[in-house]
Image: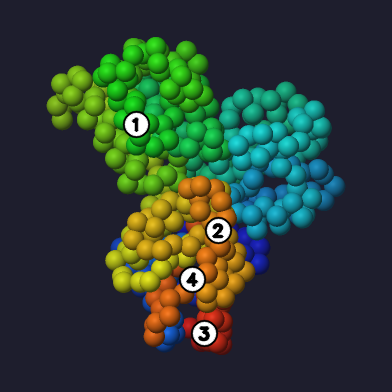
Amino acid sequence: MKTFNVPVIYRSPLITAIKNKRKQQDRMKKDFTPTVLDFGPLKILLARHFGFCYGVENAIEIAFRTVDENPDKRIFLLSEMIHNPHVNNDLLSRGVRFLMDTSGKQLVPWEELQPDDIVIVPAFGTTLEIEKHLESLGIEPLKYNTTCPFVERVWNKAEQIGEKNYTVIVHGKPKHEETRATFSHSQSNTATLVVKDMKEAIVLGEFITGKRPAAAFAETFAGQFSNGFDVERDLQRVGVVNQTTMLATETQAIADYIKNVMVEKYGLTEETIGERFADTRDTLCYATNDNQTAVTGMLQEPADLAVVVGGYNSSNTSHLVELCEEKLPTYFVSDPAQLESASSIHHYDFHHKQELHSNTFLPAKDQVTILLTSGASCPDALVEGVIRRLLSFYQLEHLADEIVI
Ligand code: SF4
């Protein structure tokens, strides 16, 4: 896979060495067991896959290069570059400004833009409406485009099934930049609807079967369906794509559920299912798949707790947290400094969107085992920081430089 020129502050020689070693040992990516770092009283099990993905490195390379090559220009990002505060703050400190926040709220009025300003499209992509608006302001919208190719792959899939008259159901978070972009591209071809979870998929199933009255659809899915969506007409042939960072198991469950609803409603067989349900297969990206499978692999091992590092608004990171939470006490942190001491940690509850403080962090045992991973937008330097921080609680910092796997 292509390598990118990412600022060295985000790299970690320690983590790079571990990843390279694992890659050499397992070129076909079949082994999802964690890397064991045994320091005696502290054992860290590091996920097989974590950290910056292709799309994030691509976006960082383009954004920082754009800043370096254009010292005399004003540079804007449509919204956060990626969902990591460290990377976003580094760009802000270099003079880049965000036009919108993550939910699409305008931070800099459009009227402030001049035709010779640079506007960078983030890794999530953007909507066709915003592209048109930039054009109307004299700005070439895709000149500095960091949209991830794996996001574009979903748009292509939605377009392909849209052309065959299937309605596109997007499993995603309705307000997330990527889902808004996918929705926009898809609805330019075909009727499109966003469902955020299994609960909404079940409700949708009830509209498909007629259990719920069509008249209630607009209110139930307000803000999540394309203009002119007609429940009677547009739920007869459907296909499911997803925001690339959703929980793989949930997307699969939603696709299976909708497929079964169609089978029952229309009396379909394996041979005829394609008439009503498009085969989209999985539109998750490779990084989401690898990172989630690596967490599942890591969770097979006995451990006391899990630490997941990443931006609080990072979708892919929150799903890693969700997987760990099913089995272990899990701490979602965005920075090593949040691990204050062996007994004190600040962490994030993404379900209720609040920061928490815990006074019972590391258990008092002869050997504490911790599962450690990070999201696709988290620099490896932060994961190394967490390892060093954990070691410091046992006065073992020096061992970080002696790790050999
Ligand atoms: S998580 Fe996947 S889709 Fe998102 S930027 Fe990374 S590689 Fe691209």
Q: Secondary structure at mark 2?
A: strand
Q: Residue at x 35, y 34 (%)?
A: 199
Q: CA distance from mark 2 to mark 1?
A: 31 Å
Q: Which residue is mark 2?
A: 356
Q: Which residue is mark 4?
A: 361
Residue depth check, mark 2 versus mark 3: number of the one nearer the observer: 2
- Whether residue 2 sits left or right of residue 105 in the image: it is left
Q: Is mark 3 within 8 Å of ligand 1?
A: no
Residue 114 image position (x, y, % from top left): 81, 32
Residue 197 image position (x, y, % from top left): 39, 37
Q: Residues within 10 Å of mark 4 (few under 14, many from 20)?
A: some
User: Mark 3 or mark 1, which is nearer the start of the sequence?
Assistant: 1
Q: Which residue is mark 3?
A: 394
- Whether residue 69 sits left or right of residue 314 in the image: it is right
Q: Quadrant of the C terminus?
A: bottom left
Front-most of residues 305 and 286: 305
> In the rendered view, how is the structure colored?
rainbow
